[in-house]
Amino acid sequence: MRILGTAGAGLRAQQVGLDTVANNLANVNTPGYKAQTVNFEEALAQEIRPAKATMLNGATTEEALSVGAGVIYSGVGTDFRQGTVTASDRALDLAIEGEGFFQVRTTGNELAYTRAGVFQVDSAGKIGDSKGNLLEPPVTLGAGVTELSVSPEGVISGLQGGQRNELGRITLARFPNAEGLAQAGDNLFLATAESGMAQTGEPGTGNLGVIRAQALEQSNVELATAMTDMLQAQRAYQVNASLVQDGDKMWGLANSLRR
């Protein structure tokens, strides 16, 4: 009986599905968060009867009989659709309207990419996020800078000595295959061979989007869809759990039979 193996594969796959949907629901209010999706595939089927097999009654089968071995998950992907952009009252709350990622240098000196534009100025005058990841290329503000502003083209300016000066520029990055980016946690992604090399440029040029200052891109998780996915995963998990119980009963009956 293959019921236990098939049901066990289903349980493992649906557990990943439940964990993924739960993570999406937990981040429904996280700025810049991109929903994760689980990709399921049918497990390889096993041939239990070859073609042209001779049956007990002498008949010959024409086709082989194959039985599936359940479901597997081939990976967790990311939905990079644009989230809703909402207004903010902070000068360094930035949203990208269109394609592209902000570039940040992590505390481990890795170049990472994010859609979460919640930036601030640290004690050294450098612009970065709350985790200590610094904007790349780096932008350092001098003393006495006030009234910061960011243009749609990524130009950072501010009042310094009574004059408005350009203090730096934001460069965005895009990838030939954004779905190939590796998740690094904290809303960060890393380039991989599957994603291709980053193509950088000024906002609004090429296929890159523009920057909207004093605004944040919200999570693209759709609450109603996520709740529906959660219910479906729960029902599928329950069905597979019932199959495990039925398989256990069947094995118990088989073991109790006497010759």
Image (tube, rainbow, N blue to C red):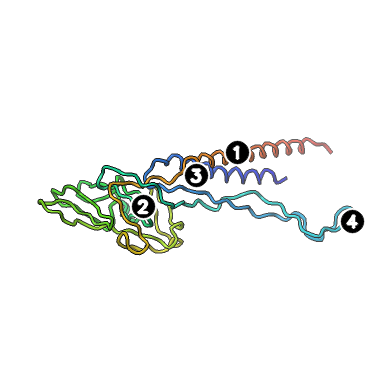
In this rendering, position of residue 126 left or right of residue 9: left
The label nearer to you, 4 versus 1, is 1
Mark sitting earlier along the chain (2/3)? 3
Image point 38% across, 57% down: which residue?
99
Mark 2, residues whose alpha carbon is within 10 Å: few (<14), some, or many (≥20)? many
Image point 34% across, 44% down: which residue?
86
Mark 1, residues whose alpha carbon is within 10 Å: few (<14), some, or many (≥20)? few
Read off the residue under disc 4. Answer: 58
Label 1 sits on what residue type? Arg
Read off the residue under disc 3. Answer: 20
Label 4 sits on what residue type? Gly
For numbered disc 2, what is the local secondary structure? strand
Q: Position of residue 75 (x, y in %)?
A: 52, 52
Mark 3, residues whose alpha carbon is within 10 Å: few (<14), some, or many (≥20)? many
Mark sitting earlier along the chain (2/1)? 2
Label 3 sits on what residue type? Thr
For numbered disc 1, what is the local secondary structure? helix
Q: On the rendered image, what quadrant is the C terminus found in?
A: top right
How far apart are the alpha carbons under marks 4 and 1? Answer: 44 Å
How far apart are the alpha carbons under marks 4 and 3? Answer: 52 Å
Q: On the rendered image, what quadrant is the N terminus found in?
A: top right
